[in-house]
Every structure is written in structure tokens, then in C-alpha cells.
Image (tube, grey):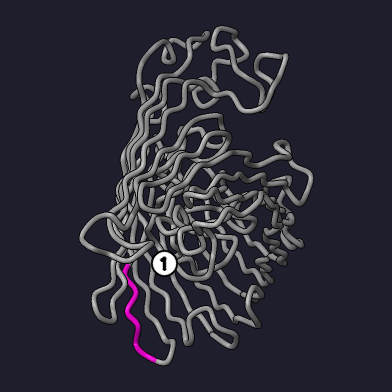
Amino acid sequence: MKKTLLLQTALVAAAGMMLADAATAQDKAVPIGVTVGGYMVRSFSVQDRGVQQVDQPAATFAAPDAEIWFNIRSVLDNGTVIGGRIELEGSTESDQIDESYLFVEKHDLGRIEVGSTDLVPNKMLYGTPNAIPGDSTTVTGASGDFFGSNSYMMWFASNPNDKEHINIYTSSNRYFGSKVGKGLQLGFSYMPNACEDRGTSAGTAGSCQTFSSAANSSTVNNLHNVYAAAANYVESFGPVDAALYAGWYQGTPGSGTTAAHNGDTLGGYQGGVNFAYNIGDGSQIQIGGLFTQESTDANTANKHGYAGGLKYLTNGSKAGSVGIGVEGRKIRVTGNEETLYMLGVTYQVATGILTFAGAGHETVDPDGSASDNKQTFGTVGIRLDF
């Protein structure tokens, strides 16, 4: 799910997406139907690093990133929307079905999701504008996964997404008289255990974990009794669009052979802001940032960091629009401190067709090490959203 955040504009309606059906909800019943959507990203990257990684050649057509989304939707006589979503990976991956969940939604009340999807902090997040589609300080992609960059992303590291749980959202337009898709929205999640797909072998990726075997002693796989909450506030003030975000979660690692996992709680909190100033004629300046703090291993390993960015769009998401963006991140995970900077340029060929090019530099400074690990990358590619 995290890959779906990498859209051109930073003010993608994360809160509004919970009410995406509100404008089309009808008093007249609509029979159940299925529509198909998704995205595809293809890019070519070059890398110059101090430490050669076996699975990352200096020049490569990056691993394809694509998903097909099956969206299920029906409307009852009273306007209640009932549906679901199944996300199929567009290339061979260990988890071939990314997400699969059902939802019930009433535009003036809120929404409930049940199934395999992200917890509310990740679905309601606002923060740094994205400079390079497919690579971000919030979500790392093909060009950013150099020195284990997945560990340094601004998302919660131990918060297990795509596991079976329940999400509950309030309607975002019930406060302050705002229009649909704006205002204050609250979200809550509860995940009893790290189950995703049916499985017969404990410790198997995607199976229902048992929490008692040595094979299942990892923090993330065994995290259970997870509670999460998030809030965002989206509003327009004249030419300025503003979005504020706050998220929190707490869970209990499963018992195993590692003493640090025996019943201690772990969790984290974060906050983000994003502002867009509409200059006129479609031109827009975006600025935003995100802070995160997390205890990733029962208080024995901590993660904290911040990210910020700036982006200019000549004509929003309309055809012919050019975007120029910069973003950066500084984050510390236990004994390593990582700094990442990126510069990107985008061109909107047509609706749903975005070309891009960019470059970045990353430094990882391990405690006690005589030298830093440094690397520079460049990338060019295309993204299709359909």
C-alpha cells in the first residue's frame, strides 16, 4: 500500500479518499460491480557507491513496480456504500496479493474497513512533497534502497501493514462546516495478531503466526494486540491548501527465544504538515515536513528522524505541467545515522502519464566506524496511473 502514496501532488486526499464515494453515493440502489485500476513505474538508474552491493549493479533497469487494483462497489437504497478492494502485484513478489479488504461507508458518518490493508497512520499520512515518483524520503523505491534504506523510511518500521485488522474512520466533513473531503478526520485501528493469509506453517511469510515458536521470534511478525490512531485536518484558506497529520501506534511483540520480545510493548508517534500555495493559472508551490519517533525493539533500539521538501508545479496535475522538487531526510536508527537528499523533475504528458528524472545522494554514518558509506544515484523513468 505504501507505494500508492507516491503520486505527483503532495495533497493527495488521504482523508478525502475515505469519502471518495460520497459524491457519487445515491438514494437509488446501484448493483455490485467491479472496476480495474492500478499503476506501473519503469525506470533506468545509475549508481555510484562506496560499498558495492551484490544485488544492485551500477546501472540497471530498476525492478518493475506495478499493481492491478480490483475495486468492488455497490450502493444500497439508503446511500450506504459496500465494497472491497484486491491489489495484485504486477511482478513476482513474495506477497503476490498486496491488499485485500472489505469496507462499509456512509458519507455523513464514516467508514469501516476489515481485512488486509495498512493501519490508519499510514493511510492518513501527510508530509513531505514527493520529488521523484517511486523514490521518497517517506517511502523508498528502486533507486533509494541502497544501504538498507527501507529501515530509514519515515513510516513506522515495526507497524505491520497488510495484516488482517479493522480500521474505523469518522467522516471528515462533520466538523467546522467544511465541504466533503475536508475538515477534521479521526481514524482508529485494532490488529489482534500478525495474520494475513491462511497458512499451515508457523513462520511462513504471510501465514497466521502462532507467537510461540522460535521461528516466529521476530518483532514485526509477532507484533500483536496492536492499537493505532491517527488524525488529519485538511482545509483551504484562500489560495492556501493546508493539511495537518498526527499518528500513533502501540503493540506487543510475541514471545519467543529473544528475551527482548517477551511481553514488552513497543510503538511510536509522528506528525506531519503540508501546505500548497496556489499562485494562479494552475501553478502551485508545495512545502511540507514529517517527524517520526519510534521504539522498534522493546525499548532496546530507537528510531527518530525528520524529513522536509519543497515542490513547484507549473499547472498542477494537468497535461503539460512541469514539476521541480527537492526533499531531504535525516534519521537515526540505533547506531546508524542516515542523510538523504533528492532532486527531481517531472513532466505530465497526459492524464495518468508522468515522466520523471532525478538524482540523489545518501550518507550512512555508523557509530564507531572510521568512515561513512556514501553513494550517489540518478534515475529516469515513466509512471502510469490508471
Residue 211 sits above or below residue 31 on the image: above
Residue 312 picture quarter = bottom left
Q: Quadrant of the C terminus?
A: bottom right
Q: Chief secondary structure of the magenta span?
A: strand
Q: In this view, does 275 lie above or below 56?
A: below
Q: Residue reaching furthest right? A: 92
The one of 277 and 151 positioned closer to us in this rendering: 277
Residue 80 in the figure: left or right of residue 71:
left
Image location (x, y in percent) of residue 214: 59, 9
In front of the other: 385 or 312: 385
Horizontal placement of 369 versus 234: left or right?
Answer: right
- Can residue 39 be seen? yes
Q: Name the residue under label 1.
A: 11
Residue found at x 57% / y 47%: 1
Which x, y percent locates residue 90?
Answer: 76, 51
In the depicted structure, whether residue 77 falls above or below residue 281: above
Residue at left offset 71%, top offset 51%: 56
- In the picture, residue 269 is in which quadrant? top left
Q: Give the answer, above or below, for where 166 lies relative to 124.
A: above
The percent coordinates of residue 34 (x first, y second) are: 70, 52
Q: Which residue sits at x=31%, y=58%? A: 173
Disc 1 is placed on an element classified as loop
The boundaries of the magenta stretch are 275-280
Magenta span includes 151:
no
The kind of residue on which mark 1 rests is Leu
Nearest the eye: 167 or 210: 167
